[in-house]
Image (spheres, grey):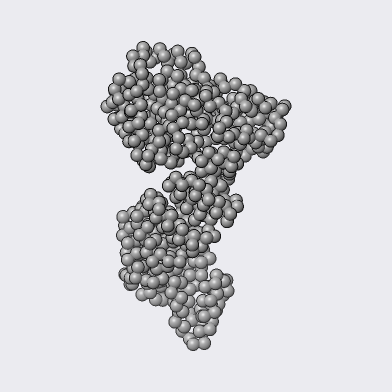
Amino acid sequence: MDTERVIKLLQPADSGSITRLENNELPVPLFADLQAQMQQALAYQKHGQLYQAEELFNDIQKNCHDSSDVLHMLGIIAFQGEAFQKAVELIGKAIELNPKNAAYYSDRGFAFQQLSQYEAAIDHYDKALAIQPALAIPHLNRGNVLKALNQPEAADESYNTAVALLEKEPGSSKSLHQIGLMAFERKNYERAVDLIGKAIALNPDNAAFHSDRGLALQRLKRLNEALESYDKAITINPDIPIIHLNRGNALKELRQLVAAVESYDHAIALMPDYATAHWNKSLEQLTLGDFDKGWKSYEWRWKEDSFPSPRRNFTHPLWLGEESLQGRTILLHSEQGLGDTIQFCRYIPLVADVGGRVVVEVEQPLIGLLQQLGGALQFVAKRSHLPEFDVQTPLLSLPLAFKTKLDAIPGRQKYLVADPRNVEAWKQKLGPKRMPRIGLVWSGRPEHQNDHLRSMKLSELIQYLPSGLEYITLQKELRPSDREMFELYNNIACYGEELKDFTDTAALCELMDVVISVDTSVAHLSGALGRPTWVMLPFIPDWRWLLNREDSPWYQSVKLYRQATEYDWSSVLERVKHDLLLIPF
């Protein structure tokens, strides 16, 4: 999973740094006997000894009351100490003494920028450029201010000017890199590749430059080029964990999962507590069917900042199958999505079988469905008051607790049952059956982090649905982009708000000849009910569906239809259409 956005390690200080600091020029001394003091003061400032630098410049100022350069340097020191208002005042005094120095205006503008006084910052950058139009830094900082003011077109104009000027300067690689990262943040990946490439041309031995260019290439799906950039970065500096992580992510996208795991291992060797690398590694291990190692690595999910479920602050011990549960109450609590809960609730009776008094905390819409499982003493809705318990386990840690292996997954045939009363009620609602009934789900929750991979538009699906079949959507909600198409196409029934909870959805699944779904909770529900289920999967599937197989070790009744290439649903839908035409009636 891609959790690292832009490499920060080895990144230079803000490219909008004080203009005067970049050229290392000494201010022209007013008196020859102050030369040594000036040099010493600048040395202090350069090495971050700000207090000593300020003291020495104050001494110099006592003898040079009209020195704009000294006031400017005191302003720079105040800026470095994050005393931005003081910097504004000191550099303002320097400007009063010398109103024709572009660097003064540029640096004062930067101080105003830190104070979020954007109009004053723009005014000072404009004054600096009126004096010296070829200064790149004011153009760059002006672009940053315009971006903060939500004026992207004007910001781009300033950035473009800065880039054109920076290309002429031999020491501008850091600034070009910084502008490239800004383009990356705006998702302008082509421009990021170009700008960071220019930085590399000026400074080819910077590992961060090559790695960040690789990340932009990866976003463009130019994966082999991205790998080349990561490899170059690693050749320059092999000791940066995040580069190995991002290289592993690129290999995952190429479905070279064994090599991806090796890259994650390199990252972990450099940083043993690197949660993202451990978690990404676990996903590839599980996708490869290496459950022995994968379940253990998967426990790192709770230390990963981008993990979608919040970490529970239980003081109760975590049970992972090692201690006896005899006479103890265990809380099993759901995590991640509804489909995860449906997939792993199969373990609830197993926990009861080893002696635990089981309390289950899940989402309210699932309680009616799961109550028929057996094994649970009590079900509690999420965010409700919990009863007393002794130990606790997240549902997706139960495969580790029971040492689940690929060829011995419990409940594979059927472990959920639809309420017969609901089935009869929905049978009456649907009316007499005149042709095969097909349940449809083409999209999941838009908030899902991989929704852009797993969901499709109704307009993509409709053209592959042959006539002579009755179609019923098992989705509770339609997206706005699908609603208009749905209204134009009258061959799909939708019951929307009549689906009160998953007991209703389960009843509808029981009445379908086939359920066809993308990777959503309904696919898991239909599989858990043992109904014929066709699951349409993206090129890079979620780990639970493994690779290169049409069946699922989790659900005996599921058939998998996989994309041949990324984002291409046409080949999947062609196979679905072909198989729909073969359904007997």
Residue that protrudes farthest toward the bottom in the picture: 32
Residue drawn 61% across the image and 31% down it: 332
Location of residue 209 with respect to 506 vertically, above or below:
below
Residue drawn 42% across the image and 57% down it: 228
Residue drawn 46% across the image and 15% down it: 423
Residue drawn 46% across the image and 72% down it: 21
In this view of the protein, can residue 523 be seen by the observer?
no
Location of residue 430 with respect to 56 vertically, above or below:
above
Task: Please give left or right for residue 273 compared with residue 64 in the image.
Answer: right
Residue 309 in percent (x, y) is at 53, 39
Residue 441 in percent (x, y) is at 39, 29
Q: Relative to the observer, which residue lies in front, 515 or 24?
A: 515
In this view of the protein, can residue 260 be seen by the observer?
yes
Location of residue 559 with respect to 71 vertically, above or below:
above
Task: Please give left or right for residue 419 compared with residue 464 in the image.
Answer: right
Residue 249 in percent (x, y) is at 47, 49
Residue 436 in percent (x, y) is at 36, 18
Quarter of the image with the C terminus is top left
Q: Relative to the observer, which residue lies in front, 459 or 545?
A: 545
Task: Please give left or right for residue 274 compared with residue 249 in the image.
Answer: right
Q: Relative to the observer, which residue lies in front, 373 or 74?
A: 373
